[in-house]
Amino acid sequence: MVQKLDEIFNDFKSKIESLDKAADVLSLKATVIGKKGSLAEILKSLKDATPEERKEIGPKSNQIKADIEKMVVAKLQQIEKDEIDKKLAENTIDFSLTDSIMDKGLQAAGLHPVTQIQQEIEDIFISMGFDVLDGPHIEDDFHNFEALNIPETHPARDMQDTFWFKDMKHLLRTHTSTIQVRGMESRKPPFKFVGPGKVFRCERTDATHEMCFHQLEGMMVGKDITVGNLIYFMKTLLREIFQKDMEVRLRPGYFPFVEPGFELDIRWKKPGKGESKHSGWLELLPCGMVHPNVLKAGGIDPEKYNGFAFGLGLDRLVMVKYMIEDIRHLHSGDLRFNKQFKMY
């Protein structure tokens, strides 16, 4: 019987090596270690064997069964890998632009203008010692509202048409202020950081509104921070973006997460002819001194520390910088539009 076991195992090894289908491998396995397999037949005959033969045949049968199980698993994994490799080889897409493609008039469109200006702003703030943070698109009520001094009954919630999930506890973030909350939770003052990203609101789409748009929010927290610090960093940012000194003004504005709060405007020339007729003030970003309740929610003692925060609409900034009249161009996916902003 021992010799028969060796023959069964060697026969299985030679057969499984040539198989390339999972069904065939499983079928071969069943013929050997299945309920009616050749190994089961030998084990049934143990009743007629001597005690010495049983001591040898029993353990050897178990070892052969275990070895076959391992070989089957390895073979099935190899077959799956080969099938995936075959599909990848058959469906390979070459994303590189070859000379033949370029000859047909197709050209790379370059980075999207929003991506370009986001990277530019990140570089500006990094040069001023700021960190760049990120956060999830799907947020909870605490980080999106409660921690920003916007309780459930606060009227400011009505100003943000929110995409809620079915549990009414999670939502698509309505602003990147959520990154500020998470930044406070993970850091100890003093610190300064910016957080760019997409935000989502249930807006009616028109020339100046979209359901998905881009923001970049920033925060600086330390001791004895003033509005003067806020103005300095904002003017430095605008000078680097527009490559000239920009005239700014602060108007009082209400935002639950800052006190006092401001609207920062810039003087600019609107698209069109005639300097006096088409120049004026453009509302660019909300800002202000961080509300004590927001500092508390972030685990910071407002008796020891204070700071400023601001929020910048990247889409709006792109439209101002390049005099784009309709925000829908930014989300059209039209390569002809993107091609105008190539950096190389």
Image (cartoon, helix red, strand yellow):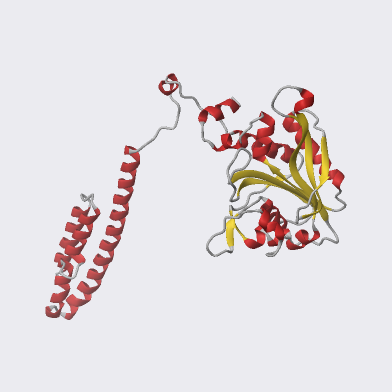
- Return the x and y of residue 334 as percentages of the image width and height: 51, 32
Is the C terminus in the top left, top right, bottom left or bottom right quadrant? top right
- Return the x and y of residue 216 as percentages of the image width and height: 68, 44
- Return the x and y of residue 219 as percentages of the image width and height: 75, 49
Residue in the foreground of this view, choosing between 142 and 42: 142
Query: Where 163 sits versus 272, above or below?
Result: below
The residue at the point 58 percent across, 52 percent down is 137
The residue at the point 61 percent across, 33 percent down is 113
Residue in the foreground of this view, choosing between 288 and 230: 288
- The quadrant in which residue 276 appears is top right
312 relative position to 329: left or right? right
264 relative position to 169: left or right? right
- The quadrant in which residue 29 appears is bottom left
- The quadrant in which residue 272 appears is top right
172 relative position to 180: left or right? left
Query: Where 154 sits versus 102, above or below?
Result: below
- Return the x and y of residue 339 as percentages of the image width and height: 55, 27
| Number of dots carrying numbers | 0
The residue at the point 31 percent across, 51 percent down is 80
Q: Residue furthest top?
A: 103
Is the N terminus in the top left, top right, bottom left or bottom right quadrant? bottom left
Q: Residue furthest left?
A: 48
Residue in the foreground of this view, choosing between 107 and 315: 315
